[in-house]
Image (spheres, rainbow, N blue to C red):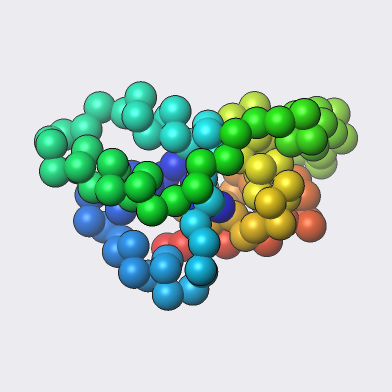
Amino acid sequence: MIDSNIIIFLSKGQIEIDDILSNYDKILVSIISYMEIYGYSFKNKREKALVDAFFNLVEVIGINKSIANIVIDYRKTANKKIKLPDAIILASAKYMSADLLTDDWDDFVDVDNDVNVLKLR
């Protein structure tokens, strides 16, 4: 599962998609990240084209009742407060039994120790 900030780094050429693909056979993105990214103002057409190409390679995971129930649990019982979009992204990773790759490791750490949260950079 790729967090929104990683997709932005990809669009700016700050990291390469091959760095991710070499470690994983399948790339997942939460529908939240999809909405966040396409709500972002791209500096140029090249960045947007890279994002479009990226989303053609990945599976976008929607929100279902199981994910919603995990989010509710996080919001009620987590050791620290987590923003709703971040909770949905983390819950999606848990539901899909996926690692979560992010640059905002601090936002997710100690919320659910069953999810492997990895800082990419």
The answer, for residue 20, to whether it is visible in the render is yes
> In the image, residue 9 lies at what x, y percent?
32, 51
Q: Residue 81: horizontal and vertical position, in percent?
A: 72, 32
Q: On the picture, is 74 further left or further right than 102?
A: right
Residue 59 on image: x %, y %: 50, 47
53 sits left or right of 20 in the view: left
Q: Is residue 113 above or below residue 92?
A: below
Q: Can residue 71 be seen in this view?
A: no
The residue under the point 73% across, 47% down is 95
Q: On the rendered image, what quadrant is the C terminus found in? A: bottom left
Left or right of 55: which side holds 69?
A: right
Front one among 29 and 114: 29
Dividing the picture into quadrants, the one containing residue 40 is top left
Image quadrant where residue 5 sits: top left
| Residue 92 placement, left or right of 77 | left
Residue ID at (53%, 51%): 28
Residue in the picture at 28% in, 48% down: 53
| Residue at the image position 82 percent from the left and 31 percent from the top | 69
Above or below, 111 against 31 in this view is: below
In this view, the residue farthest toward the bottom is: 22
85 above or below 7? above
Q: How many labels does the image show?
A: 0
